[in-house]
Every structure is written in structure tokens, then in C-alpha cells.
Image: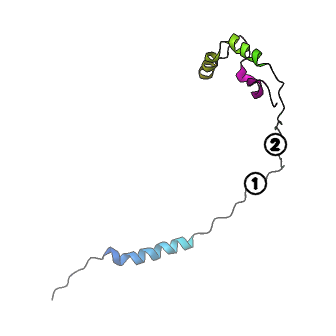
Amino acid sequence: MSTTNHPVAVKDLLPWALVLLAGTAAAQSPAAPTQPAMPTRLQYTSTLSGYQAYADEPVQSWREANDRVGRIGGWKVYAKEKTSGVTPAAETPAASLPHGAHHGGGKP
């Protein structure tokens, strides 16, 4: 009669390994809950505090606006200003004026 030694298969040890891991996980104590520190002083700042309402711009002569653009150097100077970031020294460019000043004034 021959006796054969069968090696223990991994699938036979798997249930025991899971029981062992479950036991160690259950033995751990739960973490103590931590509460964040409350602010000592509440402060509210409205997002609308810096709001500026629309204001009509004074009406300008379109001839004066065209002459000013011509003195500065025309549309090519504005295009160069946009790409290089250099402002012409001759006069304040229309790009820095309020929007209504670009078109000769505000509402009719």
C-alpha cells in the first residue's frame, strides 16, 4: 500500500486566510471623529459691493474722434498696440477710453 502526500492547494487555504483577515479588521478600533475648528468671527462681503452702474458717456464729435485716430497713426497703430502691448505716446488711445467714446457717444 502506498501513501501519497498531496500538497495543500491554495484554494484550500483561501477560506482560512479570509477568516484571519476579517478577524484582524474587526479587532481594529474605529477612528475618533474630528470636527473642524469653527471660525471665531464671521465676515460677509457682498460680491456686488464693487458694482458700478452704467452711466451715459458724453457725446463726442465723430470728426474729432477720426482726427484723433489719424494723429495717433490710424488702425495699424491700434493693431500693433494689441499685439505688442505698447501704447502710443502721442495721445491716450481709444482702447483705454470708455466703450461709448469709441463710437462717438452713448445712447441717442
Q: How many marks?
A: 2
- 94 within the magenta span: yes
Q: Vertical placement of 9 versus 43: above or below?
A: below
Q: Residues within 10 Å of mark 2 (few under 14, many from 20)?
A: few
**Circle nearer the viewer, 1 or 2:** 2
Q: Amino acid at mark 2?
A: Leu
Q: Residue at x 60, y 18 (%)?
A: 80
Q: Which mark is residue 37?
A: 1
Q: Amino acid at mark 1?
A: Ala
**Which image quarter: residue 5?**
bottom left
Task: Pick whichever, 92 or 22, lies toward us.
Answer: 92
- 20 within the magenta span: no
Q: Residue at x 70, y 15 (%)?
A: 69
Picture quarter with the N terminus: bottom left
In this figure, which residue is indicated by the disc labeled 2? 48
Q: Secondary structure at mark 2?
A: loop
Bounds of the magenta segment: 87-108
Q: Residue at x 82, y 23 (%)?
A: 59
Image marks 1 and 2: residues in contact by CB distance under 8 Å: no
Main SS, magenta residues:
loop
Q: CA distance from mark 1 to mark 2?
A: 29 Å
Q: Residues within 10 Å of mark 1 (few under 14, many from 20)?
A: few
